[in-house]
């Protein structure tokens, strides 16, 4: 076994690998860029070495820089994590040349599977069902049209070198194919430095189901069952689970056998993932193989009890697999939610900034697992992946895992940055998700106009009003104890109140006692209990027998409450205050319909309209780069362009005006 390994990565996955290595008694070496000097992975590792500037190309992606750190540290092996150099065969070869072990597959297997065209050919030859299509480079539009006609529309144009959900485009007609091919090629060239495009059948609304495999260097290969990752936006996973509610034992065995056959065909060693898409009839088709540890590997660990990082290290050290296929048994259910720095209300666009508050829920062995690489005060910038953390829950059943996820998300506090916690909560509460009726079109299909937050239903609004009444009473009771304040505090036992929610006022009566209060709304009586004290940001209550975890921030006479994806202000007033408040003038929101504003901070790459141009609704007007992604801003209306305030190459803040309509 190794004495010392280096982790050529950052963030949550570096922390994750350090944890297993240290538990095995192996000393760990972290590397860090200038942006990560104080990062958690640096503090967790036994040693840490700087590898260059913030830009990944000059640090985490630089083979010479990482090799220097390997030499300086004397590490005998390197774990690459995911992303960065994990699927770079040259890196694995360079390590081998130095006599250092790459904790991953042989370079030839990485190279064979890293290219989507090559991997499809190998998979087909190994007897794997591949997505129908043409595993060859498309030379020109004429060839593209001929091949698409043979496959049948819709088709998908894919970059052979693509990854991370980038470099793919749907064509539903000959016209779309002609146009798409040129765009796909230039995008692939720009993103991957490799413009090769191939065409395959586009399956409508499939499920993404993948098989985890483990292979040793002695010819043993097993699979650890499947994960379903159908909840995606922009072809990128957001929620994953194991097992899949769709897969039965026969389908699992068939998919597992094909995944193992493919791994054997390329001489695979280490942990790897074979990705498939499945149709409603249960047919499954190979997409690609990821020759690394997958982001969503924890759900497999939670149901099988196998530590995949430990397995990769032991296999890299030459150990024989200690598990046989029949030893692998999935127990219970596990779900992973990826917490991203992105704004679900703005089409999931990335968000940047400092985590002014970061309080994840407590981990509970076997129930709640948190893989996180940030702390309060960390900055999420544009240099790296915008994933903040992975929250996993497990239970005996899928319903139990979902319920635990809902509770854990309610207790997860993040401030200072846009994040997708409300969206994740909405997915967990969605009846279609609960029914296991998933597909990769789930998000687009369920939120066709985009996610606009959750509106609590009537029973929940009632519970929130009752909860706010007790919390507001405690605030006022506390204020009444402070000397020198004007009178006017409520009697300590309660009385009549008006709870003001968005679009609704509820007349209620509150009778306070030692443990909580009795709240009456119309003919409903709700017992409210909580140990909450003013100043606390998390309120745990039981309202009418239902446990509620609320994030509360004080506002005048009430609270901003966040719960289950809902975000609303609830004020609690005396009847007289409510009467007077109704007379207050309402400040109108400024009219922004004549403006095109930047939805996130970034750099203006291109402006596609000039002053005086007549534009159509939906017409692209500007491209903003943020988090390495080009985001096209489309015209919100038809009209004539007035003043243009932004300029190409310049940077813009969120909500900064890019142009005005005449
Ligand atoms: P997973 O199924 O593990 O989520 P992804 O394909 O989403 O796999 O990629 C995982 C990580 O690797 C992400 O951080 C993603 O951005 C990165 N990644 C993978 N392939 C590429 C690529 N070709 N170019 C850029 N980033 C990539
Ligand atoms: P990446 O390397 O970016 O992960 P994949 O080939 O694994 O690319 O595809 C990512 C996602 O894109 C899939 O999970 C699926 O949602 C969608 N996708 C890819 N190919 C197809 C296809 N032929 N038909 C329908 N959806 C597809
Ligand atoms: Mg993939």
Image (tube, rainbow, N blue to C red):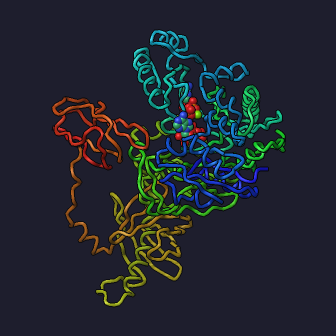
Q: Is residue 214 above or below residue 656?
A: above
Q: Is residue 531 above or below residue 80?
A: below
Provide residue 235's location: percent of width, then percent of height: 51, 35
Q: Is residue 657 above or below residue 284?
A: below
In this rendering, the count of numbered labels is: 0
Provide residue 626's location: percent of width, then percent of height: 39, 43
Provide residue 481's location: percent of width, then percent of height: 39, 87
Horizontally, residue 334 falls left or right of residue 326, namely left
Extreme residue toward the bottom, this view: 483
Horizontally, residue 339 falls left or right of residue 396, namely left
Q: Is residue 303 visible?
A: yes
Which residue is painted at 62% across and 39% down in the image?
86
User: 323 or 193: nearer the eye?
Assistant: 193
In terms of image quadrants, where is residue 133?
top right
User: 511 or 469: nearer the eye?
Assistant: 469
Quadrant of the displayed image that contains ligand 2: top right
Which residue is painted at 25% across and 29% down in the image?
616
Which residue is painted at 57% across and 49% down in the image?
337
Provide residue 580's location: percent of width, then percent of height: 23, 71
Q: Is residue 437 visible?
A: no
Q: Quadrant of the C terminus?
A: top left
């Amino acid at each position: 076994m190794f004495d010392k390994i280096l982790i050529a990565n950052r963030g949550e996955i570096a922390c994750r690998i350090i944890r297993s290595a240290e538990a095995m008694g192996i000393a760990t070496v972290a590397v860090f860029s200038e942006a990560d000097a104080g990062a958690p992975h640096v503090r967790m590792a036994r040693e840490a070495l700087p590898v260059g500037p913030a830009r990944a190309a000059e640090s985490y992606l630089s083979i010479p820089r990482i090799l220097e750190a390997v030499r300086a540290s004397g590490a005998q092996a390197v774990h690459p994590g995911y992303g960065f150099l994990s699927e770079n065969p040259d890196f694995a070869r360079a390590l081998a040349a130095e006599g250092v072990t790459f904790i991953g597959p042989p370079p030839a297997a990485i190279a064979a599977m890293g290219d989507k065209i090559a991997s499809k050919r190998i998979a087909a030859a190994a007897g794997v069902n591949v997505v129908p299509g043409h595993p060859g480079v498309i030379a020109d539009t004429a060839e593209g049209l001929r091949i698409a006609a043979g496959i049948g529309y819709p088709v998908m144009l894919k970059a052979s070198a693509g990854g991370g959900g980038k470099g793919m485009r749907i064509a539903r007609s000959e016209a779309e194919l002609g146009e798409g091919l040129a765009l796909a090629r230039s995008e692939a060239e720009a993103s991957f430095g490799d413009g090769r495009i191939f065409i395959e059948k586009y399956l409508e609304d499939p499920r993404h189901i993948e098989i985890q495999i483990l292979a040793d260097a002695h010819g043993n290969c097993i699979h650890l069952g499947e994960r379903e990752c159908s909840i995606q936006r922009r072809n990128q996973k957001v929620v994953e689970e194991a097992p899949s509610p769709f897969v039965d034992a026969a389908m699992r065995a068939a998919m597992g056998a094909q995944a193992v056959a493919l791994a054997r065909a390329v001489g695979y060693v280490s942990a790897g993932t074979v990705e498939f898409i499945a149709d409603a009839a249960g047919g499954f088709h190979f997409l690609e193989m990821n020759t690394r540890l997958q982001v969503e590997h924890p759900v497999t660990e939670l149901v099988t009890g196998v530590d995949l990082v430990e397995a990769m290290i032991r296999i890299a050290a030459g150990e024989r697999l200690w598990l046989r296929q029949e030893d692998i048994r999935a127990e219970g259910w596990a779900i992973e939610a990826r917490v991203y720095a992105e704004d679900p209300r703005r089409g999931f666009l990335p968000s940047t900034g400092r985590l002014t508050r970061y309080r994840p829920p407590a981990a509970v062995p076997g129930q709640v697992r948190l893989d996180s690489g940030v702390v309060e005060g960390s900055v999420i910038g544009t240099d790296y992946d915008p994933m903040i953390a992975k929250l996993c829950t497990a239970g005996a059943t899928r319903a139990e895992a979902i319920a635990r996820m809902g509770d854990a998300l309610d207790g997860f506090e993040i401030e200072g940055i846009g994040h997708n916690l409300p969206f994740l909560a909405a997915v967990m509460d969605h009846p279609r998700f609960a029914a296991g009726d998933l597909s990769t079109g789930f998000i687009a299909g369920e939120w066709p106009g985009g996610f606009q937050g959750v509106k609590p239903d009537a029973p929940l609004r009632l519970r929130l009003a009752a909860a706010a009444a007790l919390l507001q009473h405690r605030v006022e009771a506390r204020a009444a104890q402070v000397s020198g304040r004007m009178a006017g505090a409520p009697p300590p036992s309660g009385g009549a109140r008006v709870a003001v929610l968005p679009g609704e006022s509820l007349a209620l009566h509150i009778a306070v006692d030692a443990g909580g209060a009795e709240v009456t709304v119309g003919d409903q009586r709700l017992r409210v209990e909580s140990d909450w004290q003013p100043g606390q940001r998390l309120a745990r209550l039981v309202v009418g027998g239902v446990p509620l975890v609320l994030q509360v921030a004080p506002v005048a006479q009430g609270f901003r409450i966040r719960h289950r994806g809902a975000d609303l202000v609830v004020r609690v007033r005396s009847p007289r205050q409510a009467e007077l408040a109704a007379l207050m003038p309402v400040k109108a929101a400024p009219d922004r319909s004549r403006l095109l504003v930047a939805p996130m901070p970034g750099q203006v790459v291109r402006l596609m309209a000039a002053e005086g141009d007549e534009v159509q609704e939906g017409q692209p007007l500007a491209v903003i780069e943020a988090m390495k992604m080009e985001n096209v801003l489309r015209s919100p209306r038809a009209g004539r362009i007035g003043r243009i305030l932004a300029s190409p190459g310049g940077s813009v803040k969120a909500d900064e005006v890019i142009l005005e309509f005449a």
